[in-house]
Image (cartoon, grey):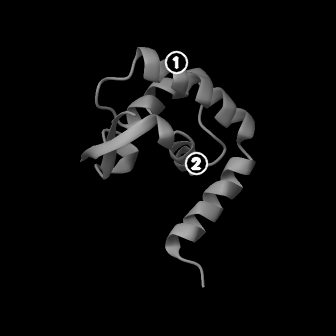
Amino acid sequence: METGAALRDAGIDTVMANAEAWADEVEHGWRFWLQHHAPDEFTLEQFRMWVTPHIGEPHHPNAWGGLAKRFASDMKHTGFTTSARPQAHARLTRTYRRA
């Protein structure tokens, strides 16, 4: 039997396999944003709001989770805050600092 984490990771891998071109563009944006625009403490949601007008949304919303895995070495988890995106219904979201 697979664990919840294993199932999550398998699903993200499937989504990302179909979003490679989009993810590569977003990764370029991530490097620029992290160096020039990211505040000392940030959320991936802040990056998402910055990058989406430039690159657009992925074919599936779970691709954002795949990017979090991809960018993990660039950031250190510091805590939680409430999401500002209306679609997120004020859920908790992680805060980070540059690694």
Which residue corresponds to mark 2? 66
**Frontmost residue, 46 versus 84:** 46
Residue 70 locus on image (x, y percent) = 57, 42
Label 1: which secondary element = helix
Residue in the image at 59% along x and 79% along y: 2
Residue in the image at 49% along x and 40% along y: 73
Which residue corresponds to mark 1? 32
* Residue 54 visible in the snapshot: yes
Q: Of callouts 1 and 2, which one flags the residue occurring earlier in the amino acid sequence? A: 1
**Can you say which quadrant of the picture contains the N terminus?**
bottom right
Measured Cα–Cα span from mark 1 to mark 2: 19 Å
Up the image or down, 8 lies above or below 73; here it is below
Up the image or down, 29 lies above or below 44; here it is above
Identified by mark 1, the residue type is: Phe
Identified by mark 2, the residue type is: Gly
Mark 2 closeness class: few <14, some 14–19, many ≥20 residues within 10 Å:
many
Up the image or down, 4 lies above or below 86; here it is below
In this image, 51 relative to 99: left or right?
Answer: right
